Image (cartoon, rainbow, N blue to C red):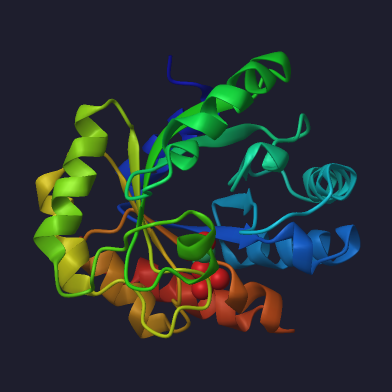
Amino acid sequence: MVGLVEKYLLDKTESEGAIHATLIDPEKVTPAQASRIADKAKLSGTSAIMIGGSTFASTTHLDSVIKTVKRTVKIPVILFPNNVTGISRHADAIWFMSLLNSVDPYFLMGAQILGAPLVKKYNLEPIPLGYIIIGDGGTAGVVGKAVPVPYDKPKLAAAHALAGQYLGMRFIYLEAGSGAKKPVPPEMIRIVKSAIDVPLIVGGGIKSRMQALAAASAGANIIVTGNIVEETKDRHKVSEIIKGIRSRKA
Ligand code: 1GP
């Protein structure tokens, strides 16, 4: 059941404690830009490339972004879809995710039913993921019709995460929303992590080495940054984030 990409992530999080993944939003980049971002991130030590956004990119564009990225870097390319339109045959794996705090059945199970046959047809590796929107959740929160977990309700976040784990999800993602003013608080990460046994992913608004270190120290196993890689010309920002993650005390 556990495929190659999932095994790679489990082995890496097991041996390193916390790793970094780079999110590329296909709506914001050309294939050439995506390839440059992936290359720089790989040189900085990122462990995987995630591809997805909160709104719509054409399938043709998504396909060419992924093909170009895959030609450039050899680390796994994992789809991070907001809808069935985020599925491409060219990726290695897909976060097969349910938005656990959505009030819309479409984002809980509807899109998954529509997408599952395509995942099989394209031979993509599905990695079951419980996705939880925290704070205002940005565009993902609005599009996904989430009832976000407030920043000061860590136990509520832990209850969502545990429910996801009990339903069989093998990763949990706390999402503050791309470009969030405030990332998921370390205290919430700590409480969620202590409640679950599966790896914890955290993303949204992480912009500095200290924030990355705080998330990793609190127990995040995969730290995702998106905006920071798209906005900055030099790769030092990503290097800084990864240094922060690696400086965490085990
Ligand atoms: C968004 O968690 C990711 O889905 C990354 O967020 O773009 O703020 O780094 P940023």
As drawn, 119 above or below 43: above
Q: Residue at x 62, y 51 (%)?
A: 49
Residue 39, x across and y down, in percent: 75, 61
As drawn, 88 above or below 179: above
Left-right relation of 180 to 4: left
Which quadrant, please, contains the C terminus? bottom left
Query: For residue 208, what is the image quadrant?
Result: bottom left
Q: Using the image as rendered, state which of residue 222 and residue 44 is in the foreground.
A: 222
Q: Using the image as rendered, state which of residue 56 and residue 212 is in the foreground.
A: 56
- Counting the numbered discs, the total is 0
Q: Residue at x 58, y 46 (%)?
A: 80
Q: Residue at x 44, y 74 (%)?
A: 243
Q: Residue at x 57, y 74 (%)?
A: 238
Left-right relation of 227 to 57: left
Which quadrant, please, contains the N terminus? top left
Q: Using the image as rendered, state which of residue 21 and residue 124 is in the foreground.
A: 124
